[in-house]
């Protein structure tokens, strides 16, 4: 019933159905559905625990990892965001969108850390090097050569690495 409501855009009704299903049978997929509907309703704080529980019960679903990674990004949990998106890449190495999203998350994490370091609030970098981001984004483009966002992200990464001629090729 929840899927039918969701298909009709009745997200509140879908959420109620998914909660009822979860009461009747605690299962990873129902937790994921609750989290997904919470996110669609703009309730990120409520969505995250439901998706975390879904992944705790079954961490083998790439799309769930990616969804949680995106929500962590919305919350500003950039390290967690990158970790979940990188896991999605490992689980589904043929999905270019996961690689693009992981590259975006890594760039944001690095920029955040650089800002903290510039303000004297961070002495040790934890984010992987930008070279890792370039690798991730190049894989995204191998999988989907028409991904304009991945091209732009790659250009930004190369600019951050001080490679302006390479960066210009991707803008």
Image (cartoon, rainbow, N blue to C red):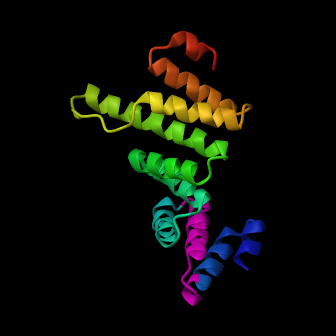
- Residue 139 percent location from the top left of the image: 61, 35
Q: In this rendered view, identify the residue nearer to me: 149 or 1.
A: 149
Q: Is residue 108 left or right of residue 21?
A: left
Measuring 63% from the left and 32% from the top, which residue is drawn there?
150
Examine the rendered structure and indicate whether residue 64 appears above or below residue 145: below
**Quarter of the figure with residue 29:** bottom right
Examine the rendered structure and indicate whether residue 99 appears above or below residue 134: below
Q: Is residue 4 left or right of residue 69?
A: right
- Residue 159 percent location from the top left of the image: 50, 18
Q: Is residue 128 magenta?
A: no
Measuring 52% from the left and 11% from the top, which residue is drawn there?
164
Number of disc labels: 0
Residue found farthest to the top: 165
- Residue 98 percent location from the top left of the image: 60, 46
Which is the main secondary structure of the residues drawn in magenta? helix
Q: Is residue 30 magenta?
A: yes
Residue found farthest to the bottom: 24
Boundaries of the magenta span: 22-42
For the N terminus, the image quarter is bottom right
**Quarter of the figure with residue 147:** top right
């Amino acid at each position: 019933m929840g899927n039918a409501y969701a298909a009709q855009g009745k997200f509140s009704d879908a959420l109620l159905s998914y909660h009822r299903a979860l009461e009747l049978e605690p299962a990873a997929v129902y937790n994921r559905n609750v989290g997904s509907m919470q996110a669609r309703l703009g309730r990120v704080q409520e969505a995250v625990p439901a998706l975390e529980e879904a992944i705790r019960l079954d961490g083998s679903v790439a799309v769930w990892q990616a969804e949680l990674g995106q929500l962590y990004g919305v919350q500003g949990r950039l390290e967690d965001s990158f970790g979940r998106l990188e896991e999605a890449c490992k689980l589904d190495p043929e999905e270019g969108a996961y690689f693009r999203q992981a590259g975006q998350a890594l760039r944001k994490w690095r920029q955040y850390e650089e800002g903290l370091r510039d303000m004297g609030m961070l002495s040790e970098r934890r984010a992987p090097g930008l070279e890792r981001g370039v690798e991730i984004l190049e894989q995204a483009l191998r999988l989907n050569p028409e991904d304009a966002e991945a091209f732009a992200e790659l250009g930004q990464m190369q600019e951050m690495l001080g490679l302006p001629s390479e960066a210009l090729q991707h803008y």
